[in-house]
Amino acid sequence: MKKRYGIDLDGVCFDFTNSFRQWLNDKLSIDIGQEEVTSYYWYEGRDDLSKKEFFEEFDKFGIEGHGYRHLDVLPGTKDALQKIVDAGHDIYYITNRPLYARQDTIDCLEEHEFPFRENLHFAKGAKGPLIKKFAVDVFIDDSPRTLVEVTVDTRATIYCRNYPFNSHIDDTWLTRVDSWDEFIKAEGLNG
Ligand SMILES: [Mg+2]
């Protein structure tokens, strides 16, 4: 059966965390370690980073820094996407990136030759309506807020890409994976 795969970009296909962490460290002369990103909102529990600074720098990273143009692709991404395509399925990229990141996102997906890259959708906060609209069968994301949001109104199979910042959410209704390999195995796409 042909399936529709809904795929998140940051944290699933692209290493947003590492690039933005380096940006914050450079711009604010602080030192956030990779292992210190245990909350989705990094300012939580930190004395050296305010909520205001976090969101100001978040926008500067995307607008002035064109940060979304140059993120590293996470390991296994291209292989996994190709396996989905080879099995005859469709891909929908569903992102909550700000709209100002649209052109950089398009250019980046083009550079890396992502399959189905024309099938790129900006959710503007809520992914559930798009999952429903496109009748997505399988969805993978890492945002705790999104994972909770999408389960309310969808019959899609939901995967959570594991990170410390999403370890607290109730996972009785989703499948946790640590890598693309685990996802591909769980979906039976190893060919
Ligand atoms: Mg994400």
Image (spheres, rainbow, N blue to C red):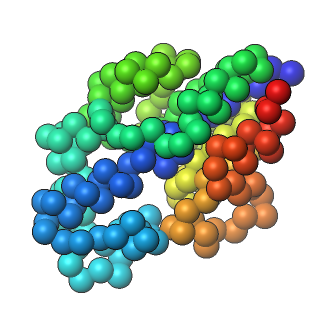
Location of residue 152 with respect to 190 vertically, above or below: below
In the rendered image, is residue 97 in sight? yes
- The x and y percentages for residue 69 are 29, 33
Tell me if 183 is positioned left or right of 49 in this view: right
Tell me if 148 is positioned left or right of 65 in this view: right
Location of residue 166 with respect to 160 vertically, above or below: below
* Camera-nearest residue between 2 and 134: 2
Image-quadrant location for residue 10: top left
Residue at image x 13%, y 60%? 27
Check the picture and name the quadrant holding the N terminus: top right
* Camera-nearest residue between 122 and 73: 73
Image-quadrant location for residue 82: top right
Image-quadrant location for residue 144: bottom right
Residue at image x 22%, y 61%? 24
- The x and y percentages for residue 22 are 25, 57
- In the rendered image, the residue lying farthest to the right is 1
- The x and y percentages for residue 177 are 69, 54
Tell me if 165 is positioned left or right of 102 in this view: right
In the rendered image, is residue 150 in sight? no
- The x and y percentages for residue 163 are 55, 62
